[in-house]
Image (tube, helix red, strand yellow):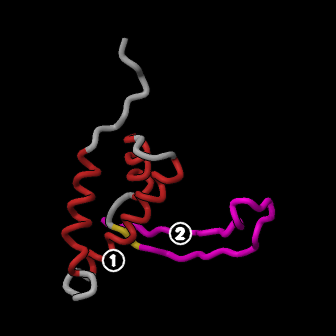
């Protein structure tokens, strides 16, 4: 099964600025994975804060999908194994439970 997503990036301005910029980018991307579920799974591992976890999950899946599609292209071929290995390591990490043991 494949999924279609609309990705929106909005420039909010420099971190030190309180002014919002009126600049954004929107595009569609297809992916063979349910991205929102993957973001939840990465957030549950608590490796990073919520925003960085979402960035990692979405960035990795968007890049990974292109690398998978273009795996025979000499530009992308060297990325296949490192991305696969990183993804497998990430998946193997256990989620952090919300409960603490006595």
Question: What secondary structure is found at the residue carrying circle 2?
Answer: strand
Pointer 1 local density, CA inside 10 Å: few below 14, some 14–19, many at least 20: some
For the view shown, which residue lies furthest in the bottom direction?
A: 74
Residue 53, percent across and down?
Answer: 45, 51
Q: Name the disc covering residue 29, or none.
A: none
Q: Residue at x 58, y 69 (%)?
A: 8
Q: Nearer the viewer, residue 80 or 4?
A: 80
Q: Quadrant of residue 31?
A: bottom left
Q: Which residues are magenta?
A: 1-29
Quadrant of the frame with the N terminus: bottom left
Residue 48, percent across and down?
Answer: 45, 47
Q: CA distance from mark 2 to mark 1?
A: 15 Å
* In the displayed structure image, the side of residue 71 where residue 101 appears, left or right: right
Pointer 2 local density, CA inside 10 Å: few below 14, some 14–19, many at least 20: few
Q: Quadrant of residue 27?
A: bottom right
Q: Residue at x 43, y 62 (%)?
A: 58
Q: Is residue 31 above or below residue 45?
A: below
Residue 79, percent across and down?
Answer: 25, 74
Q: Are marks 2 and 1 in contact (CB under 8 Å)?
A: no
Q: Is residue 45 above or below residue 71?
A: above
Q: Name the disc covering residue 66, or none.
A: 1
Q: Which residue is mark 2?
A: 7
Q: Residue at x 26, y 66 (%)?
A: 83
Q: Nearer the viewer, residue 4 or 72?
A: 72
For the view shown, which residue lies furthest in the right direction?
A: 19
Quadrant of the frame with the C terminus: top left
Q: Earlier in the sequence, mark 2 or mark 1?
A: 2
Q: Residue at x 41, y 22 (%)?
A: 99
* In the displayed structure image, the side of residue 36 where residue 83 appears, left or right: left
């Amino acid at each position: 099964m494949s999924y279609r997503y609309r990705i929106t990036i909005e420039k909010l301005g420099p971190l030190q600025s309180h002014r919002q910029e009126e600049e954004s980018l929107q595009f569609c991307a297809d992916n063979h994975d349910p991205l929102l579920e993957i973001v939840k799974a990465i957030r549950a591992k608590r490796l990073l804060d919520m925003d960085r976890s979402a960035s990692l999950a979405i960035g990795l899946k968007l890049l990974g999908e292109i690398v998978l599609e273009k795996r025979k292209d000499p530009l992308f071929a060297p990325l296949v194994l490192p991305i696969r290995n990183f993804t497998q390591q990430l998946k193997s990490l256990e989620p952090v439970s919300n409960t603490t043991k006595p």
